Image: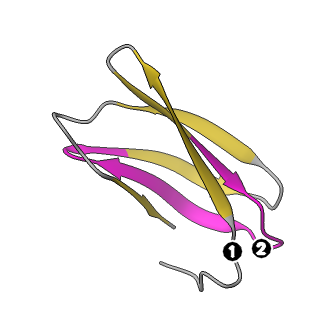
């Protein structure tokens, strides 16, 4: 479920790595993010819940060229 963008702030940082990309999702808001998912072509990586002020890094390995989506 998407929450109002005005309430939430997050940072996605991509850094190249062998076989994929490291994605850091940081919850800079005062509200928790629930069921966070990072999606790239053919790949869905579940981050889970992020409390305010926390972050989590995942490795995403898309199949070919891809854009990146964040769901929560």
Magenta span: predominant SS is strand
Residue sticking out furthest to the left: 64
At a point 71% along the width and 82% down the height, the residue shown is 7
Q: Nearer the viewer, residue 49 or 12?
A: 12
| Residue at which label 2 appears | 31
Q: How far apart are marks 2 and 1 (CA)?
A: 7 Å
At a point 26% along the width and 36% down the height, the residue shown is 62
Answer whether labels 2 and 1 touch (C-beta < 8 Å).
yes
Q: Does the magenta stretch include residue 29?
A: yes
Where residue 44 sits in the image (x, y, percent)? 33, 47
Left/right placement of residue 70 relative to residue 48 reads left
Magenta stretch, residue numbers: 24-44
Q: Nearer the viewer, residue 41 or 37?
A: 41
At a point 83% along the width and 55% down the height, the residue shown is 53
Q: Height in image: 11 above or below 3? A: above
Where residue 64 sits in the image (x, y, percent)? 16, 34
Q: Quadrant of residue 6?
A: bottom right
Earlier-in-chain disc, 2 versus 1:
1
Where residue 29 sits in the image (x, y, percent)? 78, 69
Left/right placement of residue 59 relative to residue 64 reads right
Q: Does the magenta stretch include residue 37?
A: yes
Instruction: Categorize mark 1 by other alpha carbons within 10 Å: few (<14), some (14-19), many (20+).
Output: some
**Number of marks in the image?**
2
Where residue 70 sits in the image (x, y, percent)? 45, 60
| Residue at which label 1 appears | 8
Instruction: Categorize mark 2 by other alpha carbons within 10 Å: few (<14), some (14-19), many (20+).
Output: some
């Amino acid at each position: 479920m998407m929450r109002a963008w005005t309430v939430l702030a997050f940072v996605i940082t991509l850094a190249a790595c062998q076989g994929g990309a490291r994605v850091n999702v940081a919850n800079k808001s005062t509200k928790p993010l629930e069921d966070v998912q990072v999606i790239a072509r053919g790949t869905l990586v579940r981050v889970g819940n992020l409390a305010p002020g926390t972050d989590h890094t995942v490795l995403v390995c898309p199949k070919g060229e891809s854009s990146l989506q964040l769901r929560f």
